[in-house]
Image (tube, rainbow, N blue to C red):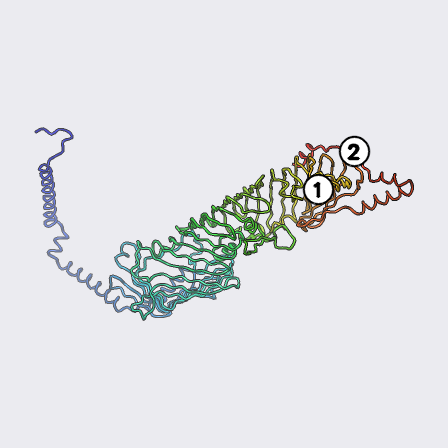
Amino acid sequence: MIDRPGDKPDAQTLRSAATSVWRAVKARAASLKTHVVTQDPVWQAVRRPGKPEIIAASITLGLIACFLVFLMLFDWNWLRGPISRAASASTGREVVLNGDLDVRLFSWTPSATVRRLSIGGPAWASDRKTADVEQLDVSVRLRRLFLGQVEVTSLVMTRPAVHLIVDGKGRRSWDLYPDRPDDGRGAKLPVIQRLVINDGRLTLDEQRRGMKLDAVITAREARAPEDGESGFLLDGKGTMNGAPLTLRVTGGPFINIRRDRPYAFTADLAGAGSRLRAKGAVTRPFDLGRFNAVLELEGQDLADIYLLTGITTPNTPPYRLRGDLSRDGALFRFADFSGRVGSSDLSGSLEVNKVGERRRVDAKLTSRTLDIDDLAAVLGARPRVTSEGTVATSGAPGKLLPDAPLQTERLRTMDGTLSYRAATVRANAFDIRQVSLGADLKDGILKLDPVAFTFNRGELNGTARIDARKATPHSAIDFRLSGYPLESIILARGGAPTVTGRALGRAKLEGPGASIHDLAANSKGSISLVVPQGRMRSAFAELLGINVGAGLGKLLSGDQSTSGIRCAVADFKVANGVASSRTLVIDTDVVLAQGSGTIDLGTETMNLRIDGETKKPRLLRVWAPITITGPLASPRLGVDASAVATQGGLVGALATLVNPVAALLGFIDPGLAEDADCGALIAGAR
């Protein structure tokens, strides 16, 4: 048979080839053996040792035996001093072995016992030891050591006392290598198959956040019910800024722990008006940089979370959230969380990462239904929870602008981004229907873009920049209002709107200030409001010019007729928190009203004066300006009484000198006012 390319060899051919290879291997091995036996000098010396070989072997075996006997009889306490000095030089702090040191080497799991181990603090906290351990028993697996791995088969600590300190500069007393940058990935400890802690104690003094904690630590294996419960327990109490603080962490017993078997735990931390509860597992035991848990958060104000976590969040009403928390090295992820903040629902995801030396937080949040008072609390108002929901106030009675200060030092500790969208908004006085916010924080500068409010009709869009690199932040805002209905600003009377039309506006301000109120009180820039066209109740249009006859007649008769608004322009220049009018005009079909005055944003008061001129002849016209004075929250509308008195005095003198009929001329207006140049006024205000 002729083999063709692609034909597969049969079984007999394969067996023949394998047999040929095996015979060749055996022949080569036999040849090598013969060469070693007949010609190799080492083999010859082993088979027929001479006197030199016998002497060398005897000396070697004797030395090994002496070394083993030496190790068996050696007093390891002689090395306490050298070991202490070497450890102190390596860590930069005083390490002392005050008690006996026993080492047992002759085992597949060599072990050691250290008594009265003391580890001092760093130079800046040398008055407080970092750790004291009455007795430490440890054993390792020898075979793993040969492979370059450390596997602790047993670790037993008796009455360990650990004291942890974080000073105002963020230095940590337990950091043995402070010059090494912290990558935030968490500690990776060697595998410990069995861990026992008897009567342990842990204290923490975190000076930056005013946190003090004193906790007991135990890890035990109960062999009988009367021995109590097995497992790990850390139970502590303390204070945070003077308020009570509690921490409790529990886990299963540390026995037969394996890398591929998650270790379950629970944690409960309460303090600073907040509470965090977690139930999860360390996915790879003793790699503290990886775990998964279900996390529940609740408290009075999310801003208080900073004291527990170091994460900067805005002020909020009471909250309750629940979601999945995971850690993968330096990355923490709070995913698919949901809950309520005040009267609003909130859901989304949040990531916290360590980028270089700074913490970075990125969040994407949404609300199906937002209570606008909850958002006002985020912007600096002070929330007050009632049976009907959250009510936000500015903080000061009779004031509109929030005065809650911004925590600038917290903004400087992290970077990040935020996006938020509310699909719907509960019924509110401003008729807001949707909200969209975006934020970017980097190196102490917070940029808000966009800040968007969608009304039933119209919208408000803007940006803001807050420079928080100094103790007093410097802010700049630029907001534009478009298409907002006047009937939502000025209340209806008699079941009919007083005025209708669409308002356009812009506020462009900048200045120093830790709160919205302080920013306004120190700001400079401009504020403008424009109504290109609209309608006004004729009665009120007449009264703008104090046309007593026509205005009061229409008002008292219930007349619902309207007059056209050709334009209305209010344009103010702001300096040192005081807005001074540059243009203040209301031009209707029947009256041209022009005004002047100021609005003090610091005291939140206004002092405006409006003079009206009729465009048609009117009887009983009082030449007196309208005044708008008092607080922004409740302004007072009136008439300049001195001008009325002056007009009345002139009329009285005319009646005395001429006759009563001539006196009526003092109340007659020929109506010579002309239309305003609306195009130029509107262009100037923008």
Q: In which quarter of the image is residue 280?
A: bottom left
Left or right placement of residue 333 versus residue 565 in this view: left
**Quarter of the picture holding the N terminus:** top left
Residues under numbered marks 1 and 2 in contact, where contact means CB atoms less than 8 Å apart: no
Mark 1 neighbour class, 10 Å CA radius: few under 14, some 14 to 19, many 20 or more: few
Question: Which residue was labeled with disc 2?
Answer: 672
Front in this rendered view, residue 48 or 229 = 229
Front in this rendered view, residue 165 or 328 = 328
* Secondary element at image label 2: loop
Question: Measured along the vertical axis of the image, is residue 275 above or below residue 333?
Answer: below
Mark 2 neighbour class, 10 Å CA radius: few under 14, some 14 to 19, many 20 or more: few
Alpha carbons under labels 1 and 2: distance apart: 28 Å
Residue 105 location in percent, x, y?
A: 26, 64
Residue 47 location in percent, x, y?
A: 11, 55
Amino acid under label 1? Gly
Question: Which residue was labeled with disc 1?
Answer: 558
Amino acid under label 2? Leu
Left or right placement of residue 357 versus residue 262 in this view: right
Left or right placement of residue 389 versus residue 55 in this view: right
